[in-house]
Amino acid sequence: MTTSFRLDFVFSQAEFAEATPCQDRKQGVDYFLAGLPIAYRKRRFPVNRFDDLALRYSRETGNKTECDKLMDGSCMAKLYVFEFQDCWVLCPTSELVQCLRNRRYVLHNGPDGEMACIKLQDVIHFLFEKDATFANPKPQTSTMEHDSRFDDRRTENEWQKG
């Protein structure tokens, strides 16, 4: 069976909704897609510049951060979507929480506090290149070969063939 995408598919208002400012601030949710709470982060550089996912770890003001919400369970987002210049990276929230709990991150100074930087190779993720069309998607899974959750390990040429 070949997977195909409808080119004319548009989300209706009921299927795609923006979170309220309160949901964003208290629960870490930016959007809802068919009821699924999503956190969205936009980056102004290509993914291979650092090969990591950065989350706010501390603030100079002392206010609660994204990492605080992930660790204390108040983050309700089930999926993180990182938009880079060249691709989108989708990562289950549980993967980020596991990295934070196991201290698999490096702290870097940000503009107003510290950022926890988690290497892409340390999390299960899907990477979709922006130059891929809906007719020829090029998803890439993480390089974690020991994880059996992804049985479909096709090459880029095989993805293009469908």
Image (spheres, rainbow, N blue to C red):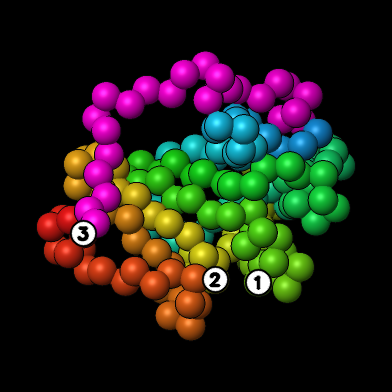
Main SS of the magenta part reads loop
Q: Position of residue 67 (x, y in %)?
A: 74, 52
Q: Residue at x 81, y 33 (%)?
A: 26
Label 2 Cα neighbours within 10 Å, binned few <14 / some 14-19 / many ≥20: some
Looking at the rendered structure, the kind of residue marked 1 is: Arg
Instruction: For the N terminus, give its image quadrant.
Output: bottom left
For the question of whether residue 2 can be seen, the reply is yes
Q: Which mark is residue 122?
A: 2
Q: Which residues are magenta?
A: 1-25
Q: Which residue is mark 3?
A: 159
Q: Is residue 17 magenta?
A: yes
Q: Which residue is mark 1?
A: 104
Answer whether labels 1 and 3 touch (C-beta < 8 Å): no
Residue 79 percent location from the top left of the image: 59, 47
Where is residue 113 shown, x and y percent of the image? 72, 46
Name the residue at 49% across, 71% down: 149
Q: Amino acid at mark 3?
A: Trp
Q: Comparing marks 3 and 2, which lies closer to the viewer?
A: 3
Eye-nearest disc, 1 or 3: 3
The residue positioned 24% from the left and 30% from the top of the image is 7
